[in-house]
Image (cartoon, coloured by chain):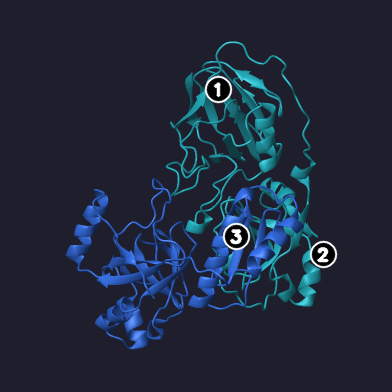
Chain colours: A cyan, B blue
Amino acid sequence: MKAEIEVLQPGLFSTIQDVGRFGYMKYGVPVSGSMDTYSAKMVNLILQNSPDCAVMEVTQTGPKLKFSAPVEIVISGGNLSPKVNETEIKHNTIFRVQTGDVLSFGKRQFGCRSYLGISGGFQTEKILNSRSWYEGITKNSHLVKGMKLGYHSIVGSINNTYSSIKPESSYIRNQGIVVAKGPEFEKMPDTLKEEIFLQEFSVSKNYNRMAIQLEENFKNSMEPITTGPVVQGTVQLTPGGKIIILMRDCQTTGGYPRILQVMEQGMNSLAQKLKGDRISFRL
Amino acid sequence: MGERSILIEFEPDIDKNLLEKLLNIKKLLEIKLFESKVEVINTYSSLLIIYMSNIENVYSAFSAVNEVLEDANVVKNHQPELFHIPVCYDPEFGLDLSEISLNKNLSFSRIINLHTAPVYTVYFLGFLPGFLYLGGLDKKLQISRKEQPRLEVPKGSVGIGEFQTGIYPKKSPGGWQIIGNSPVVLFDVNSDPPCEISAGDKVKFFPVSKKEFQEINDAVGTGKFQLKKEKYES
């Protein structure tokens, strides 16, 4: 049965994401997809959804959502104190919502992004083979008050074995970000090559789905490169000495030296960081 | 780069022959690696193979790529298309025409002549969905990016950034020098592929008046405008 979630309050910044828009980089279209792929995978796994089902990515301050019909949901990732009506709900555990129930979020306990999975996945528009929201590609780019999001309601009996698995959550607080050397790593001055692994960095106020900029400044004498390909996790060093880590909504090409490449696990850790959080790079 | 892509770099250069070589290899890679579900993109002197999921065996992936690289010079399979794109160079749209005119000591009409004369090569798309990196700009028009990038460049703006020229497919922040505006839609999410023009194709600009601009704009709005294109023989 078709059902809808009504957005009563949008919160800070929430989007619908799936595994990303694959195959359109050649047209300059960002891949997008869940910032923390581990948590997104987890909610789908617990709900026995297919891994490419769309989830809601909730950032820092959560929305208030009203369900028009019964369905099962799971929340994972950063903890933003979710509750249904007045009942607090546990992470990584199936919760059955009823008609008219309201899901809301409270105080941020840890992490930056929380993932809301729903049985069958969100049934929002599919553009270029993906439901991931991105401004200019999908009609919606973030939750807005009054918006309605489709889903499939569960009719009749459902799986009673309410499974709860305990996913790994230490990565959320992990400071050490595992990286590989980037294409221009060897062009860095020797001192920088060492320093980049010794220094601790902090996340600046510029952190979003496109990129995370670090607060610290490096002296940089490297020349810009001829525009070349970049991917999610590419770490760039700007002429001004700023370090920029490209995240899920990054452009497909760039002209700054690509000094490091963050591995997938590190991307999930970075997705959970906010301003002032400390990180360090590890080979 | 990372767990899901392989970067192949060539000697840095911006050159039509290199582009042709890259596009040949790209095509062969797409065929060879079809089963592995990959996307291959090119820039001026790089190819990037992006795997849909993590690369299972990096050594067999490398050897497949190497095989392709070894016999890449044999075939030529790209037949480029030439697209004719209307541009209105009225100062209302050409926000930086005066600056370029002063800087380069060129009259407006000379700038327009120089910009509409060449057949440009589409090296790749990037920066924004549907943004074409066009090479082949006349040296007399080469000018550095603006020191202070604009926070908002209007949709359709035609700009110059050093040796490159291009069209902003949507409104966006940008640092290129703006000389005109094109009413055509280069990127449409409701079509698949979303962009008619791809790497290796050719582009030629032709000037239109403000009145013609408006007419084309209206035709685009009602879906009646057809971009003029033909097979390109080099």
- The label on residue A102 is 1
State the image quarter where residue B131 is shown: bottom left
Which residue of the protein is positioned furthest toward the bottom in this rendering? B105
On the rendered image, what quadrant is the C terminus of chain A found in? bottom right
Location of mark 3 (residue): B29
Label 3 secondary element: helix
Amino acid carrying label 3: it is Leu
Task: State the CA–CA distance, disc 3 to disc 2.
Answer: 39 Å
Identify which residue, B200 or A274, lies in the foreground: B200
Of the two numbered discs 3 and 1 in the rendering, the one whose residue sits closer to the viewer = 3
Chain that bears disc 1: A
Chain that bears disc 3: B
**What x and y, as percent, mark residue A85?**
59, 20
Work out whether disc 3 and disc 2 sit on a shared chain: no
Location of mark 2 (residue): A198
Amino acid carrying label 2: it is Leu
**What x and y, as percent, mark residue A143?**
49, 38
| Residue contact between numbered discs 3 and 1, judged by CB atoms under 8 Å | no
Task: State the CA–CA distance, disc 2 to disc 1.
Answer: 47 Å
Chain that bears disc 2: A
| Residue contact between numbered discs 2 and 1, judged by CB atoms under 8 Å | no
**What x and y, as percent, mark residue A167?**
77, 34
